[in-house]
Image: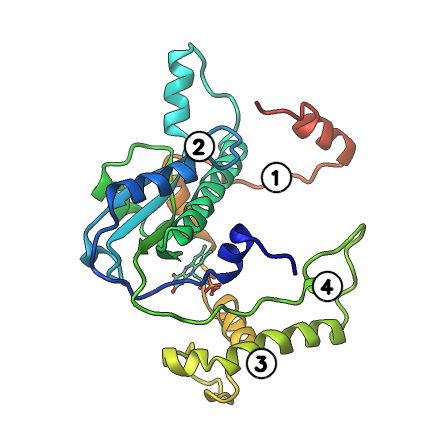
């Protein structure tokens, strides 16, 4: 594969879950945040909350950002222009989530290039009430993800990824036949087992009562771990929607499927440019 300093930085990154205590210098923090701002945006609807309280995050990182999908700030700009938003919450939130995500990942890579490690924590959407209170959030700011950052105090290996042919589909989506899926799973699982990932983390997601455990740390790997996550957790449909609603967004309700895909494309994307 081609190499250059940017690619090396991206390909060498891995999540860091142990940090040195020292605070990154102000100019380092500023560079990281500016790099985040410089990400492509639909409407600049990502914003950041910062906490330097190391007791406030599980990894005791010196910096913890709460990455927000922020429609409130956009509404303030519109208000100043004499506009009211008629775009639906679902429509607006989809763009805000993207703006926030691309911004956050720019920060991760910028941080990496400056020697900072980082790790996302996905719990934010389930801590909405606490985060709203802690930072005094107005309505229509949704805490999307936490991002811890600081100088690393560990040096873990780069984690495996699916093979490229299981990831890039040119012209049409392929049939996911058993053999193709098995090969990709094998690459992920053997990669994690080689790193002894779950034994070192001493972590297997426990099965509910009545289900017999057939794995140990010699066989438990990524595909079983992720399957357990999506097979056991997150079944409370209302929970996420309740938290989205708590932030002042209305995205619920049954919707009829469009009968005219062409009209859908014209209506939603026909105008193309957002700049
Ligand atoms: C949206 C999101 C949520 C995540 N949440 C957590 C988390 O709660 N705890 C954690 O240890 N890692 C979390 N991660 C980090 C992933 O576990 C990690 O990126 C993934 O295992 C790949 O490893 P790598 O980043 O070292 O390549 C999260 C990553 C993303 C993108």
Residue 1 is situated, as x and y percent measured from the top left of the image, at 65, 61
Q: Is mark 3 within 8 Å of ligand 1?
A: no
> What residue is shown with label 2?
45
Alpha-carbon span between mark 4 and mark 3 = 18 Å
Going by the picture, which residue comes out furthest to the front? 4
Q: Which residue is at a point 18% across and 58% down the rendered structure image?
A: 55
Q: Earlier in the sequence, mark 4 or mark 1?
A: 4
Give the color scheme: rainbow, by chain, secondary structure or one colour.
rainbow
Image depth: mark 1 or mark 2 in front: 2
What is the secondary structure assignment of the residue under circle 3? helix
> What residue is shown with label 4?
165
> What residue is shown with label 3?
190
Alpha-carbon span between mark 3 and mark 2 = 40 Å
Of 129 and 112, nearer the camera is: 112
Image depth: mark 4 or mark 1 in front: 4
Assess disc 2: are there few (<14), some (14-19) or many (≥20) residues with their C-alpha within 10 Å of its C-alpha: many
Q: Which residue is at a point 19% across and 52% down the rendered structure image?
A: 53
Image depth: mark 4 or mark 2 in front: 4
Residue 207 appears anywhere in the view: no
């Amino acid at each position: 594969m081609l190499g250059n300093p940017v690619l090396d930085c991206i390909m060498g990154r891995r999540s860091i879950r142990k940090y040195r205590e020292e605070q990154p210098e102000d100019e380092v923090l500023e560079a990281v945040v500016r790099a985040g701002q410089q990400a492509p945006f639909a409407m600049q609807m990502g914003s950041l909350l910062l906490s330097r309280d190391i007791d406030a995050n599980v990894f005791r990182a010196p910096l913890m950002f709460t990455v927000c999908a922020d429609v409130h700030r956009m509404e303030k700009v519109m208000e100043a222009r004499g506009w009211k938003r008629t775009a639906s919450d679902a429509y607006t939130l989809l763009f805000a989530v993207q703006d926030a995500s691309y911004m956050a990942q720019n920060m991760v890579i910028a941080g990496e290039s400056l020697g900072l490690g980082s790790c996302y924590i996905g719990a934010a959407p389930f801590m909405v009430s606490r985060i709203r209170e802690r930072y005094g959030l107005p309505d229509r700011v949704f805490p999307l993800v936490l991002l811890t950052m600081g100088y690393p105090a560990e040096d873990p290996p780069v984690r495996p990824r699916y093979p490229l042919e299981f990831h890039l589909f040119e012209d049409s989506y392929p049939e996911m036949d058993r053999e193709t899926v098995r090969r990709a799973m094998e690459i992920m699982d053997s990669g994690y087992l080689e790193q002894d990932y779950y034994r070192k983390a001493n972590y297997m997601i426990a099965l509910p009562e009545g289900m017999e455990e057939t794995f140990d740390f010699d066989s438990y790997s990524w595909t079983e771990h992720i399957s357990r996550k999506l097979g056991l957790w997150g079944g409370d449909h209302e929970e996420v929607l309740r938290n989205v609603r708590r932030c002042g967004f209305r995205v619920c309700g049954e919707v009829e499927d469009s009968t005219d895909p062409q009209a859908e494309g014209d209506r939603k994307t026909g105008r193309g440019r957002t700049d």
